[in-house]
Image (cartoon, rainbow, N blue to C red):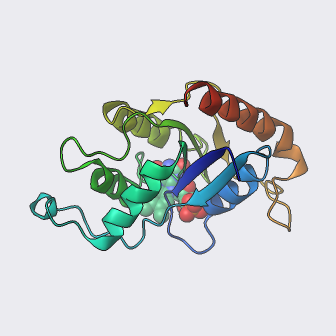
Amino acid sequence: MSQYQIAVLVGSLRKDSLNQKLATGLTRLAPPGFSFTQVQIADLPLYNQDNDDHPAAAIVRMKDGIKAADGLLFVSPEYNRSIPGVLKNALDCGSRPTGQSAWAGKPAGIIGVSTGAIGTAMAQQHLRNVLSYLDVAVMRQPEAYLQMREGMFDPDGNIGAGSRAYLQNWMDKYVAWIQKNTG
Ligand code: FNR
């Protein structure tokens, strides 16, 4: 059994999502003792405070998955210089009712890939802002702002040779951050 269970949140619902590929390739760089489970956010209803005392089953399921995890990994595109609405909705759904947030106290890492030159930098800053309020301990360094390039992923879904050392270093630091901020 893995010592550290990580809940992965991917901010794109697209079938051929680059960020989904990044999540898959990146998590393969983790050492034994770490296991990653993607949290489904596509079926969450739009957050409505009226439903706080009778949340939808999908919200309960997502919150249970977050609460059971030792740490979080956010892999997200940037939409219009911010985080995608589906990801913000998941954060909102998991944060309520007041005092029953699933996020509080979890250590986390943020990473993302985009086709644009700034490589999700603004989305990541917005996400840091939200997670700070939600009392999530986000790794500060290294930051990783990735612009999609030919060869970033190999045909088997691994991180391509040209990006591997960079992303292995990110994963090593992420692993250390989770270990330092749990238990
Ligand atoms: C984008 N894209 C984008 N890229 C970027 O670098 N900064 C941005 O603000 C935006 N805004 C944006 C808005 C919307 C609605 C879409 C659909 C796309 C481009 C984006 O980086 C590209 O589509 C990625 O491939 C999206 O990630 P996934 O779905 O491949 O993971």
User: Which quadrant would the C terminus be assigned to in this image?
Assistant: top right
Q: Is residue 1 above or below residue 179?
A: below
Which residue is farthest left?
50
Residue displayed at 80% across by 58% down: 153
Residue 143 visible, this orientation: no
Left or right of residue 4: residue 50: left
Q: Name which quarter of the figure residue 90 lies in.
A: bottom left
Left or right of residue 86: residue 120: right
Residue displayed at 55% across by 25% down: 140
Q: Is residue 89 above or below residue 31?
A: below
Which residue is farthest front?
1
Near-viewer residue (11 or 52): 52
Image coordinates for residue 109, horizontal then vertical, percent: 56, 38
Image coordinates for residue 145, horizontal then vertical, percent: 62, 38
Near-viewer residue (68 or 168): 68
Residue displayed at 29% across by 45% down: 101
Residue displayed at 59% across by 59% down: 37
Residue 70 visible, this orientation: yes
Q: Name which quarter of the figure residue 128 lies in.
A: top left
Image coordinates for residue 86, horizontal then vertical, percent: 38, 61
Q: Is residue 127 above or below residue 15?
A: above
Left or right of residue 119: residue 97: left
Which residue is farthest right?
161
Image coordinates for residue 70, horizontal then vertical, percent: 54, 42
